[in-house]
Amino acid sequence: MLSMKAVFAGYGGGNVLQSVDLECAEQTITCIVGPNGAGKSTVLRVISGLLRPSAGEITMDGEAIGDQAPDEILRRGITQVPQSHALFPAMSVHENVLMGGYLIRKNRTLLRERLDMVKDRVPLVASRAGDHAGNLSGGQRRMVEIARCLMLDPKLILLDEPSLGLDPRSLAGVADLIHALHQEGTTVLLVEQNVRLGLGLATHGVVMEGGKVRLTGTAAAVKDDPEIASLYLGGTKAPPLNSPPAGQGTETTSV
Amino acid sequence: MTQFLQAVVLGLLIGGVYALMASGLTLIFGVMRIINIAQGAFLILVAMITWWLWHETGIDPILASVITAPLMFGFGWVVHRLLISRVSGESSSMSILLTFGFAMVIEGVLDITAGNRFRSATPSYFDESFRIGSVSLPKAQVFGFLAAVLVLAALYYVLTRTWTGRAIRAATQNPSGAALVGVGAAGTAALAFALGSATTGVGGSILSVLYPFFPASHYDWISRLLGIVVLGGMGSLPGALIGAGILGLAETLTATYGSLSWSTLVFYVVIMVVLLIRPQGLFGARLREDAA
Ligand SMILES: Nc1ncnc2c1ncn2[C@@H]1O[C@H](COP(=O)(O)OP(=O)(O)OP(=O)(O)O)[C@@H](O)[C@H]1O
Ligand SMILES: [Mg+2]
């Protein structure tokens, strides 16, 4: 479904992503893990169009999307929940979620339907509808952000550390939600620091470090890989891993 | 007591008009982080057009805003496309230089075409007043205030009840968050600039009746508007309303109990005191640079 090939991207001072290859097959949950600054969020930003890649190819269902603006990428069914600060603090929770349907604003019945569906899935949206998003707790904001990204009924959801700041119950709620979305056929690409949670939920795993993909495979294989521990604990001196070339990476993830 | 009441009522009437004039400036800043120094020149340009319309056709100057507001909406759109959008990614000093330059161009054009002399539109009700008890309200001031309130209400409606307005507010509060729901930065900026310019279409018409003006008056006006917006908090619409009310009251109260020449000074003292306590202004949010 989504494919990145030899993607380079940066923020002006050199490339942060150094030739990233990534595949998300339809109806999979792929979890990217890796140390701080590895470039995980940057990968999501490049896919959602917030950041333009300086080289490489990104395709969605075979069509190149690397040079598209964020709204065009939304129209192709990809929505993103960024790592932080996605909401409009001085708008109500209701309006924030409504804004998630900005692109379908002309179709009022559809908008209404989606809003009801989202309220159903994330009860907070109904119970705190009138409150300013800026007045919610961090975890509550997270739930609203996730709710908002469902308004377009996406094919592919990009979640940047969905567990950030969630209490155990909300965490279970989010995990259930991701699981349910997956069951319904949505493809998920998430970044997670909570490796056990992330890889437990995922079907596929990707380990990133220093702007490169170091390891890909099924979630179980990645979780049990002895080298993942060294990547996290070994700092910059982590031994070089069997980073697969582009073609091979594709193969492993679509098993 | 009457004197006090008179000063307060008049101050609020003036404040309403100031609020309208400042609303455009703060709206534009909110979305684009651009301080449109030419906002004062837009006002004077509209005042001149209004004066001319009134002089040639006898149309009521305040009603003439039905013509000038859409005109300025279009003007703002074009100016944004041709000029402002080119500096959108640059530092704010670039946009200040650009809009300042543009203000001087407008001033120069007005100087050449209309001449460097004071003008004022004087419709029939110009020196008449309503009387409520012992308080007298100049008719022009009342009509100007009503027009301003009407436009501000319309602006409020657009911003809170329409998708265009939601998009503008979203882009104001969190640009990258707005991008993530499909609100295009360029389109929103052009709209906000056009809307902000349209408010001068009404504000300038009111100005032409209430204040004598000449091409270089825009310096005076932009400094007043900047004062209001800084006091209220850059980019905040409620802030602009409160700031404008304070300026209006400061002017009339000082003029009543002190002297007219002190009134501006008092306002700037108020600004300084407020900024010492709240650097972001009364309603300003501290800028959040980390929105990702
Ligand atoms: N807006 C930005 N401007 C400049 N550099 C940035 C920006 N965002 C990220 N970077 C740089 O890009 C690199 C990768 O950042 P990224 O946010 O992708 O890391 P991450 O893997 O998501 O880390 P974390 O686990 O801490 O979220 C970092 O070195 C960071 O300094
Ligand atoms: Mg990150």
Image (cartoon, coloured by chain):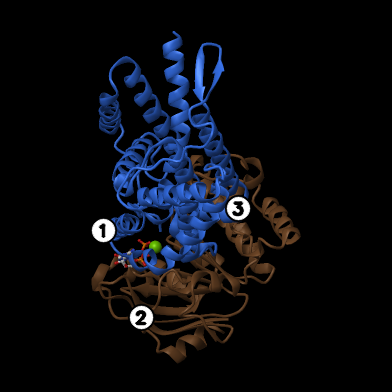
Chain colours: A brown, B blue
Is A127 situated left or right of B210 in this image?
Answer: right
Q: Is residue B13 above or below residue A196?
A: above
**Observer-nearest residue: B184 or A136?**
B184
**Observer-nearest residue: B120 or B196?**
B120
Distance (Cα) linking label 1 and label 2: 32 Å
Q: Could you confirm whether marks 3 and 2 are on the same chain?
A: yes
Mark on residue B97?
Answer: 1
Secondary structure of the residue carrying tag 3 is: helix
Tell me which amino acid carries mark 1: Leu
Mark on residue A54?
Answer: 2
Give the quadrant of residue B275: top left
**Residue B69: percent from the left, percent from the top?**
53, 52
Quadrant in which the N terminus of chain B appears: top left
Q: Could you confirm whether marks 1 and 2 are on the same chain?
A: no
**Residue B197: percent from the left, percent from the top?**
46, 53
Q: Residues within 10 Å of mark 1 (few under 14, many from 20)?
A: some
Whether residue A217 is visible, yes or no, is yes
From the viewer's perspective, is the residue at label 3 or at label 1 nearer? Answer: 1
Secondary structure of the residue carrying tag 1 is: helix
Tell me which amino acid carries mark 3: Val
Mark on residue A97?
Answer: 3
**Observer-nearest residue: B159 or A204?**
B159
